Image (spheres, rainbow, N blue to C red):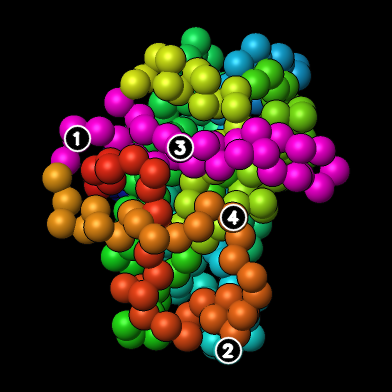
Amino acid sequence: MIKNMEEYTNGLEELVKRRTGLLEQAQQKADELLSELLPKSVAEELKVGRRVEAKNYKSASILYSDIVGFTSLCSESEPMEVVALLSGMFQKFDHIISVHNGYKMETIGDAYCVASGVPNPSKTEHVSNIATIALLQREFLYDFMIPHRPGQYLHCRWGFNTGPVFTGVVGIRAPRYSVFGPTVTIAAKMENSGVPDRIQMTLKSHQMLTARFPEFKSSSRGSVKIDGIGTLLTYWLDGVEDLLKSDRSDRDKNITTTPPAPSDEDTDPYSFPRENSQVSSANSVVPLIP
């Protein structure tokens, strides 16, 4: 009888050990999922039952990117092909921002929003982080072939802005860390009013970037009329000087700095190979490559 009791006790201990291990694995997966939805510092506050208050930041940088002709591509592709395309693209984008102190705010379809300077504030480094992220994303897409369309490549627009923002956690069942303010709105307008394969930034971003980080090179686009905002002086981010030599720097030529007139190719940018689409630069600048 004592032997049976010992066997029962040992079996019970083993069962508890296994169940504890499963519980720890489930908790780890839940923490990983929460960290995808929220910054670590915010997630820790919510886990202990604390309310996360809205917070103001004096200066941060916000970047938006968007695939040109994505609606047309979707209408001509199978759903799983589109999912595979975005998965491959965003996986690399996520890696880039994790290395360069960015935080992915959201993805809506093909639109991708990144912030730097929140939730971890920085004086000016955030604009350098965002500029680096945008350049690396562009370099990645230059070689990223559409999986289900061999020989064809994606084209994106990028736009970013720098200024004050405030953040907060929105939602209860599915909380999301969000950033708000005119700075965010103008960043989205920078992307929307841009041209394929170019990175547009506001005057404020340009001033901070060139004053503190002269290795970044830019050129003036001039005054641009922005819907709902008015006329803004904007700049192109062209590249980074003396970082890495590239045999592809010749592509940064021969395109105007204003949106081209609509044409059949503009309607379907996937109808021609990537080599036929070049990006200009007012300065001779070596592109940033991951």
Alpha carbon distance from label 2 to label 1: 39 Å
Q: Name the residue under label 1.
A: 243
Can you give x and y, in whole percent of width and height, for residue 16 in the image?
Answer: 40, 41
**Residue 221 relative to residue 6: left or right:** right
> Can residue 129 be seen in this snapshot?
yes
Quick one: label 3, few (<14), some, or many (20+) residues within 10 Å?
some
Closer-to-camera residue (201/55): 201
Q: Mark 1 against mark 3, which lies toward the viewer?
A: 3
Closer to the chain start, of discs 1 and 4, is 1
SS of the residue at dot 4? loop
Which disc number belongs to residue 219?
Answer: 3
Magenta stretch, overall SS: strand
Residue 224 is covered by the magenta coloring: yes
Give the amino acid at mark 3: Ser
> Can residue 19 be seen in this snapshot?
no
What residue span does the magenta drawing correspond to?
Answer: 215-244
**Residue 69 relative to residue 214: left or right:** right
Quick one: label 2, few (<14), some, or many (20+) residues within 10 Å?
few
SS of the residue at dot 2? loop
SS of the residue at dot 3? strand
Which disc number belongs to residue 101?
Answer: none
Closer to the chain start, of discs 3 and 2, is 2
Alpha carbon distance from label 1 to label 3: 18 Å
Seen at 47% across and 85% down, the residue is 271
Seen at 65% across and 12% down, the residue is 58
Q: Mark 4 points at which residue?
A: 258
